[in-house]
Image (cartoon, rainbow, N blue to C red):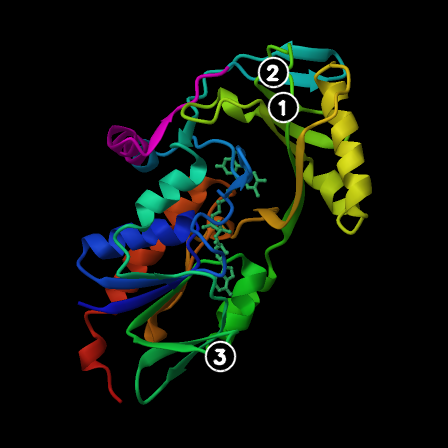
Amino acid sequence: MAHIAIIGAGMAGLSALQYLAEQGHEVTVFDKSRGSGGRMASKKVDDASWDMGAQFIRAHSAAFTAQLQQWQQYGWVDEWNITPWTADANGLHPSPDNVQRYVGMPRMTGLSRSLLEPAAAFVASTRIISASREASAREWSLSSDDGKTFGPFDGLLINTPPQQAIPLLSAAPQLAAQCEEVDMLPCWTLLLTLPEAMSSAADAVFVKQGPLSWIARNNSKPGRDKKEAWVIQASHEWSRQQVDAPREQVQQELLSAFFAALQQPQQQPDTLWLHRWLYAIPANSLTLGALSDISQHLVVCGDWCHSPSLEGAWLSGQQAARTLLTTLPNMAEEPL
Ligand SMILES: Cc1cc2nc3c(=O)[nH]c(=O)nc-3n(C[C@H](O)[C@H](O)[C@H](O)COP(=O)(O)OP(=O)(O)OC[C@H]3O[C@@H](n4cnc5c(N)ncnc54)[C@H](O)[C@@H]3O)c2cc1C
């Protein structure tokens, strides 16, 4: 049994955790946030809650299709059966498609919590700032920004956005250089609740003009609180242009665009929460699946190593875990 550290409890890290734990290894997971899930975060303010990052899960590959079916049997995900709408130059209109959409239950982080269960330990609210491997010891040790050290670990798996992986890759500058190639796009996200339910029949809207790209009625998803709660996402282009704009201004523009896209009169929300995802989605994924430095028992994964979705992150985590395991059986035979 090997002791393995995973930095980052996003979908890719949790996918790797599942695989490594199934093979009998002891895995410690670190995250700078209080909980797991990364960009499939959920947000709760008073009695309102929203899926703040990833909105739904869909599968293209046979492997992820089978995984989703298994998670559905466990009750970790359920189908979100909606007819999407489109808001464009022709107005607001239904755009039915054949996509099967799933959501985590009872929120997106419900899924990440279930996936985290096999971890030997989850070290939350802990930002790892360096990872070092003494050549003589052949083991990894980690340091956090509050002065703590962790280890030793036989193997290290990094699952952070590329910009946040670079400082952790001083032992593998060739991997840090590959991280530099990836451009991550921002996304301004507005969450709100309304005192009165809107009459619009549209629960999910792909917006093709103006500042927005997506609108969803969070309470139309299975298992959610009943309160009328909306998620409003700006387009990546607009978010990049407005990345450093004053928050008040961003909030006002998104709010106006939301009511305009749904063709509804403005009303005063009773809860508002604005979030800026600085590293929302890779503009250019590396398509390698995962990065690795086999001699150092080091792998790096994330959607940006594969493709920009939860499925891409999951597949990347699977590949990273498999690659890491191929390096571990030979450890004892390595020359000092
Ligand atoms: C607004 C938005 C909407 C989206 N919508 C969808 C959608 O509908 N469907 C879909 O499939 N995908 C969607 N995505 C994309 C999807 O969320 C991502 O592809 C996926 O969640 C990425 O997972 P990951 O494991 O690669 O990375 P992340 O989820 O980013 O996980 C990385 C983790 O590393 C942690 N971390 C970073 N640095 C450190 C450090 N130094 N020390 C400790 N921990 C650290 C972070 O806190 C985070 O938890 C969306 C993304 C966003 C932002």
Q: Residue 39, how many percent across, how many down? A: 51, 46
Q: Residue at x 59, y 62 (%)?
A: 163
Please tell me whether residue 301 is drawn above or below residue 171 in the rendered image. above
> Label 1: which residue?
206
The residue carrying mark 1 has its beta carbon less than 8 Å from ligand 1? no
The residue singled out by tag 3 in the image is 147
- Considering the numbered disc 3 on the image, is that residue within a helix, a strand or a loop? loop
Q: Which residues are magenta?
A: 66-82
Nearer to the camera, 96 or 292 = 96
Q: From the viewer's perspective, is 246 left or right of 124?
A: right
How packed is label 2: few (under 14 Cα within 10 Å), some, or many (20 or more)? many
Give the x, y percent position of residue 315: 37, 45
Pick the residue in front: 136 or 202.
Answer: 202
Query: Mark 3: few, some, or many residues within 10 Å (few <14, many ≥20)?
Result: few
Which amino acid type is shown beneath numbered disc 1? Phe
Using the numbered discs, state the Cα–Cα distance from disc 2 to disc 3 in whole angstroms.
50 Å
Which is nearer the N-term, disc 1 or disc 2? 2
Q: Which mark is residue 85?
A: 2
Q: Residue at x 49, y 79 (%)?
A: 147
Q: Earlier in the sequence, mark 2 or mark 3?
A: 2
